[in-house]
Amino acid sequence: MSSLPVTTKHRINRIPQIPHVWEGDIFPIGEMLDNLEPELKSNGQCIVWVDGSEGFIRTMDVVKGNTGPEAMVRALLKAIEKPQSPAEPARPHKVVVRDRELQFFLRGALQGLDIDVDYQGDLPLLDELWNNLQQVQPQKVGNIPPQLLEKLEERAIALMWEQAPWTLLAEYNLIEIKINAYNVESLYACVMGMMGQEFGVIFYRSLDSMKKFRLMAGEIGDSTMEEGDIERAFLQQDCWFVNFSLDDSDFDEEDEEQQLWYELFLAEAQYDVPVQVVFGSIHPYEGIRPLVDVEELDPLYLGIEALGKFVQKNKKRLEKDPTQNISHQYSIKLPWGNNKPHPVKVRTMPEVTAELEAIEGNLHDDFAEEEDTDIISSDLFPEDCVISFASFPEDIIKSIEAKPSVWVDMEGIEFENENDKIPVIIIQTTRPKGKLVVEQLIKEEGIEYLFFTSGEDPFYGGTFDLPMIKTQGGINHVIAEIEQEGETFANTVKKWSQKTKKWQGKCGVAIAMGSTGVNRGSPKEQHILAFFATELVSKEKAGLDKLVLNIEMM
């Protein structure tokens, strides 16, 4: 059974203990709270903690019916730290519940807090209060001085947002930050943002928690999972997080300049885009919350500073191969307190990366076995990828084939003379995203054929050219949605397609990195991550003459 995080124990133990007995229970909501959304009203529960000595409610939480016993702990922590008025922060001498399993669970979860947990079959005070309950009072959290959060935000923007580690690392490229201070031995950092949807860094306080969550998250694709299961998996994490989001407080959809900011933000471009920084914590017994204690700032600041210095020093090495062993030690001073320097060691964890890749690979294989064949997917290739049309001579193929880190599939392609060039479509993205694409294409046993079709959006209007591939695994992947404005793309495809006739339709698909650098749209040989031999077929042969976007694609 996981325990409360060290920061929480420290925080709670500082709160004075009172010789009071608190009673806690879970009630079905039924018809008593009419202001709730229909799902909670029909399948919700209400957790109540009452000070039996004083006779008033300290906290009340409304949760989904299958949230789990951890919700009782989260509610109790609120009752201790941020109780409803007129109660003051206090720690009880004893808590009483009328469920044996819950009693044993709380005993394990509350170890080290000097709180006895007892069982009592009948709690009449709770029943009476519940029968008269009419509304939930809002809670307030957070007691950190704003100037300290401003310093933390300033460093997060400078070292995380401006350096964009998510363009170098995938979310399974774990970085250990060994602190050995402030009751934290190590933090395990991973990035968010490689799919261009959400940007940030997660600092796991427990390696086991990270592995457990990744395993549970991999199972979320199962259609039998309910919303409560997904929420429970998310709340099983034990981490601090730093999220970056567009500052839309003054956002005007009609303002073209602000629209450009938004597009740059989604495209991972590191321009002067106004962003908001959100700091928070997730724990099974605390839920998701903002930072509420000054003691949390110290290890989080050290983690941000150390990771930022590590990325800055090793950018080229990480871009080349983030799975290699890299280790550095830094001396970091906090901008508050006594400014004593802290030695912090940072290292990559290739062994854990390999373990996570193996876990995800098994989950994808299991999921693929359950899926129907010949499906259409628009999820493999990132929305911001760039398509180029080229021709490769044999020496380029041999050159990239000699690199152990590049996957090359040349089946069915033979060069008859030194002047021959095989037609190639190059799909360029960032290195982490490109590696994910290559891994998935390898799992699907390569590319069976390439084709070009069209699609229309029934909701917003407009038609699109759709370059697509079908893998040997029977999945049709949309590479990009290109708006049909003029004949530029169609003419380029036509000219390029003529070159495949000499090769009896054979061609190649190359995955390349470098889409955020100066070589965007014109990748070089050193940017190639993989080459797949395939053939160009008509959309009629592919059986996908025209698609209706957002309806037929999955």
Image (tube, rainbow, N blue to C red):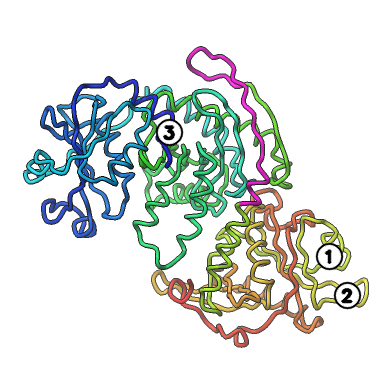
Q: Who comes first in sequence, dot 3 or dot 1? A: 3
Give amino acid for label 1: Ile
Badge 3 density bin: few <14, some 14–19, many ≥20, Cα 10 Å: some
What is the spatial separation of the Cα atoms under label 3 and label 2, in whole angstroms?
62 Å
Residue in the picture at 30% in, 22% down:
15
Give x and y (percent) for residue 41: 19, 56
Residue furthest bottom as drawn? 540
Quarter of the image where one finds residue 494 = bottom right
Give x and y (percent) for residue 247: 42, 41
Q: Are marks 3 and 1 in contact (CB under 8 Å)?
A: no
Mark 1, residue position: 397
Residue in the picture at 36% in, 42% down:
287
What is the spatial separation of the Cα atoms under label 3 and label 1, in whole angstroms?
53 Å
Mark 3, residue position: 5
Residue in the picture at 34% in, 20% down:
14
The kind of secondary structure element at disc 3 is loop
Give amino acid for label 2: Phe
Mark 2, residue position: 415
Residue situated in front as seen by the camera: 554 or 474: 474
The kind of secondary structure element at disc 2 is loop
Badge 1 density bin: few <14, some 14–19, many ≥20, Cα 10 Å: some
Residue bounds of the magenta highlight: 332-355
Q: Nearer the viewer, mark 3 or mark 2?
A: 3
Q: Are marks 2 and 1 in contact (CB under 8 Å)?
A: yes
